[in-house]
């Protein structure tokens, strides 16, 4: 299982890095090819369409993952039902979004504006089908199909946009290219995934059961989407769009850090569903996941605290360097990474109503406290509210996890304490005046040495290293 987990995390990490780099390159081409207003319009339409399309399955994709993890022979039938539900929702969704977005206006083109909007919305809607097939890849432990396919899709999109830019074709050609690339990717991805599934004619899980379970996942997804987006909307309303832009740029670093937690759970979720009733399994998973997430926290948080000004200068130039204090506050999110583990365990153990309670509490505190504090302290006030809200959600999740599942946090506290002591030993590298590009590697090397010298690494860590080596050798072969 360990080798498969490491292999899965490696593939997901590869896909995340490759797709983000290729999308960044595509964005650069679009920024140089389109004027600012046209690019802003296109980005808004794509973002709006992808947001709604991502939840158009009404949570049935995650419900499918839950059932298929323990009843693999039913995966094909469950997938067909989830696809039917998503498709039934997608048709009116595309029509409604096209009608609404047309009222916002569109850049002048040789084709009708409604057609440009329809194709742009349809492209993102078709692309969202990859979520359902990715859940199947998780169940089958074939995330390599997802990683390779997704990376090739973004590569094709980048090359296509670069070609269209060179030919000086209009915006309609760009959205048409994205629709065609999405359609081809989904067709090939679906074919590769479905052919691996065992034949099954029926499943005892009906459409109604899938929707009933999906409803809870759908609400959880909406609240997860609200964590960052609600902050930005409140800050824009209270302190203006410029403050919201600064906060949004800083929060991307937090989202990047929390992507590590998401990658881990995308790989281990099927096994956790299968073995959740095994004695001590959830405790072992909690301890191990928290250990590595805390390790990421002690690597990232001191750097964000000591070099917040330099980081903001890299992100937005000298004008943004003065806003670094709020980044220092957001850096505290790193210490809350284990809260994501507790909340996900509530999901794995079917405590979805309690997971919703935690998330509602977190979002409510963030919005109410953020509205009050951002009036007085601007971006820093919203950062305080966001950290406080997620802290409350995470603490409640920890308490519920402990009381209902018997999971204790002794090992988590012990590991965090030892990591904190090692961090104190390595921190002098950050404040002796070295430039960031020298100080950060020196700090990380010092941290690794301090952890090794204090005997932090255990047999589980050695097995993980061996699994990583095995994965690298397998790829070289």
Image (cartoon, helix red, strand yellow):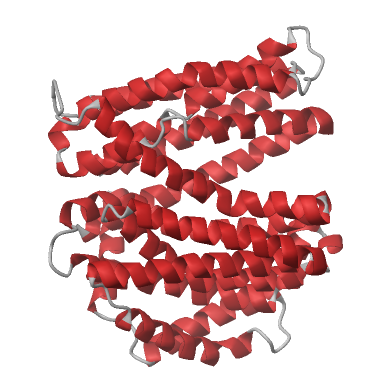
Q: Nearer the viewer, residue 190 or 444?
A: 190
Q: Nearer the viewer, residue 144 or 330?
A: 330
Residue 7 in picture, x, y percent from top left: 30, 53
Q: Quadrant of residue 417?
A: bottom left
Residue 275 in picture, x, y percent from top left: 16, 56
Residue 442 in picture, x, y percent from top left: 58, 81
Total numbered badges shown on the rendered structure: 0
Q: Quadrant of residue 87?
A: top left
User: Residue at left 28%, top 36%?
Assistant: 64
Q: Is residue 200 above or below residue 287?
A: above
State left or right for residue 185 relative to residue 38: left
For the N terminus, the image quarter is bottom left
User: Residue at left 78%, top 12%?
Assistant: 109
User: Residue at left 16%, top 44%?
Assistant: 70
Q: Nearer the viewer, residue 396 or 327?
A: 396
State left or right for residue 52 relative to residue 44: left
Q: Is residue 237 above or below residue 115?
A: below
Q: Is residue 426 above or below residue 341?
A: below
Residue lying furthest top in this view? 111
Q: Is residue 84 above or below residue 320?
A: above
Q: Quadrant of residue 292?
A: bottom left
- Mark yes or no: residue 15 visible: no
Residue lying furthest right in this view? 319
Residue 334 in picture, x, y percent from top left: 53, 70
- Mark yes or no: residue 272 visible: yes
């Amino acid at each position: 299982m360990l080798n498969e987990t490491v292999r899965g995390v490696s593939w997901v990490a590869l896909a995340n890095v490759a797709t983000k780099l290729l999308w960044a390159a595509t964005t650069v081409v679009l920024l140089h090819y389109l004027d600012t207003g046209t690019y802003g319009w296109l980005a808004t339409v794509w973002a709006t369409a992808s947001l709604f399309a991502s939840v158009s399955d009404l949570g049935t994709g995650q419900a499918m993952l839950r059932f298929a993890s323990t009843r693999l022979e039913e995966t094909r039938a469950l997938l067909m039902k989830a696809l039917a539900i998503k498709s039934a929702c997608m048709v009116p969704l595309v029509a409604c979004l096209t009608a609404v977005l047309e009222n916002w206006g569109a850049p002048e083109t040789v084709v009708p504006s409604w057609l440009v909007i329809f194709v742009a919305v349809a492209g993102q809607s078709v692309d969202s089908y990859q979520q359902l097939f990715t859940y199947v890849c998780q169940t089958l432990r074939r995330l390599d199909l997802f990683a390779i396919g997704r990376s090739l899709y973004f590569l094709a999109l980048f090359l296509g946009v670069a070609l269209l830019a060179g030919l000086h074709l209009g915006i309609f050609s760009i959205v048409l290219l994205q629709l065609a690339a999405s359609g081809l990717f989904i067709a090939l991805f679906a074919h590769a995934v479905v052919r691996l599934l065992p034949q099954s004619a029926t499943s005892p899980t009906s459409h109604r059961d899938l929707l009933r379970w999906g409803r809870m996942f759908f609400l959880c997804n909406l609240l997860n989407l609200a964590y960052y987006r609600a902050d930005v909307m409140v800050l824009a309303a209270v302190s203006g769009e410029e403050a919201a832009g600064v906060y949004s740029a800083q929060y991307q670093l937090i989202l990047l850090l929390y992507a590590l937690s998401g990658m881990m759970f995308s790989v281990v979720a099927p096994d956790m569903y299968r073995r959740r009733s095994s004695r001590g399994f959830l405790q072992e998973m909690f301890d191990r996941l928290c250990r590595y997430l805390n390790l990421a926290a002690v690597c990232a948080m001191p750097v964000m605290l000591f070099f917040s000004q330099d980081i903001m200068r890299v992100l937005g130039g000298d004008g943004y360097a003065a806003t670094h204090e709020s980044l220092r506050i957001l850096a505290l999110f790193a210490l809350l990474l284990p809260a994501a583990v507790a909340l996900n365990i509530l999901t794995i153990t079917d405590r979805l109503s309690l997971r919703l309670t935690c998330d509602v509490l977190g979002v409510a505190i963030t919005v109410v406290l953020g509205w009050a504090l951002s009036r007085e302290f601007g971006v820093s006030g919203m950062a305080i509210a966001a950290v406080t809200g997620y802290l409350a959600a995470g603490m409640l999740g920890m308490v519920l996890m402990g009381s209902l599942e018997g999971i204790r946090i002794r090992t988590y506290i012990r590991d965090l304490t030892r990591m904190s002591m090692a961090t104190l030993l390595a921190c002098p590298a950050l404040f002796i005046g070295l430039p960031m590009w020298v100080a950060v590697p020196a700090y990380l090397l010092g941290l690794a040495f301090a952890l090794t010298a204090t005997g932090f690494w255990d047999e589980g860590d050695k097995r993980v290293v061996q699994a990583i080596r095995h994965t690298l050798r397998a790829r070289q072969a």
